[in-house]
Image (tube, helix red, strand yellow):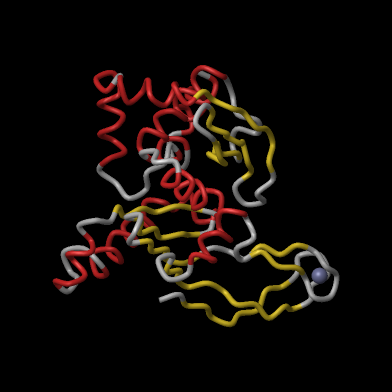
């Protein structure tokens, strides 16, 4: 079921209070239109009734797409520094809904689901695009590590994140974006064969893959954010 709650969004520019419908859950199997809106960036995006300033509502919802095997807990980018706690909460929520603590019927559905935790709308969109292009999201994160190591540093390294934004049979499109403002800083295209090379080179990537595989927060931000600033600098400059 897709659930929306009435809420008030205060315009950052003029201070007007806007009554909005805040998404609490999205069922993409029944609401293909909501999935399409997430993909085109219009989901939970509105305008201040008084001054017309774009308002992007903060993410805090569950996204379910049984057909594509996706269960995703979506949190706002501001929560990223607390990803460890959020990941535990996501695991508990998933276990109750489709995991070991769920009723049998739900557990059976859960066998076909990949539970994930993401922060921000671009991160959610990336998971949907990856599924659309039949890309394994773990390999995708390994590809991002490879891009950062080979192509060079991120603009505004402490705030920006590299996100898949689209692609075709030949190319994958990425953008460096600022997580909490969604400002696009730079874009880059990567040949799809770079992705295939990581799948083919399974042995070289085995340790890093194992790190990502064991968790719900499948994102290179695991190692780039939070504690461990020296490592962050090393990776981003590498
Ligand atoms: Zn306003």
Q: 147 above or below 157?
A: above
Quadrant containing ligand 1: bottom right
Number of disc labels: 0
Query: Which residue ends up furthest to the right in the rendered image?
Result: 51
Give the x, y percent position of residue 235.
47, 24
Give the x, y percent position of residue 19.
68, 81
Relative placement, left or right, of 225 versus 87 is right
Q: What residue is drawn where x is 47% and y is 77%?
A: 3
Relative placement, left or right, of 50 versus 83 is right
Quarter occupied by residue 222? top left
Give the x, y percent position of residue 168.
53, 34
Q: What residue is drawn where x is 56% and y is 19%?
A: 151
Give the x, y percent position of residue 129.
49, 46
Query: Which residue ends up furthest to the front in the rendered image?
Result: 169
Q: 45 above or below 123?
A: below
Task: Pick whichever, 136 or 154, lies toward us.
Answer: 136
Q: Name the quarter where the N terminus is drawn.
A: bottom left
Relative placement, left or right, of 117 versus 124 is left
Q: What residue is drawn where x is 67% and y is 51%?
A: 181
Q: What residue is drawn where x is 21% and y is 70%?
A: 106
Quarter occupied by residue 93? bottom left
Q: 125 above or below 192?
A: below
């Amino acid at each position: 079921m897709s659930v929306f709650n009435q809420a008030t969004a205060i315009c950052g520019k003029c201070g007007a209070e806007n009554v909005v419908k805040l998404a609490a859950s999205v069922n993409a199997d029944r609401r293909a239109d909501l999935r399409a809106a997430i993909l085109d960036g219009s989901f939970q995006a509105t305008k201040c009734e008084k001054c017309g300033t774009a308002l992007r509502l903060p993410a805090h919802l569950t996204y379910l797409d049984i057909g594509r095997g996706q269960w995703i807990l979506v949190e706002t980018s501001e929560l990223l520094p607390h990803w460890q706690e959020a990941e535990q909460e996501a695991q508990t929520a998933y276990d109750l809904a489709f995991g070991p603590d769920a009723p049998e019927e739900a557990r059976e559905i859960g066998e076909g689901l990949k539970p994930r935790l993401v922060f921000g709308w671009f991160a959610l969109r990336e998971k949907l695009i990856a599924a659309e292009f039949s890309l394994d999201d773990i390999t995708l994160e390994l590809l991002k590590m490879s891009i950062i190591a080979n192509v060079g540093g991120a603009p505004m390294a402490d705030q920006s994140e590299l996100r898949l934004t689209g692609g075709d049979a030949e190319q994958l499109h990425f953008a460096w974006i600022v997580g909490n403002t969604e400002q696009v800083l730079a874009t880059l295209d990567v040949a799809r064969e770079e992705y295939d090379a990581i799948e083919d080179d399974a042995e070289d990537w085995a340790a890093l893959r194992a790190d990502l595989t064991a968790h719900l927060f499948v994102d290179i931000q695991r190692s780039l954010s939070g504690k461990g600033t020296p490592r962050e600098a090393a990776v981003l400059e590498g």
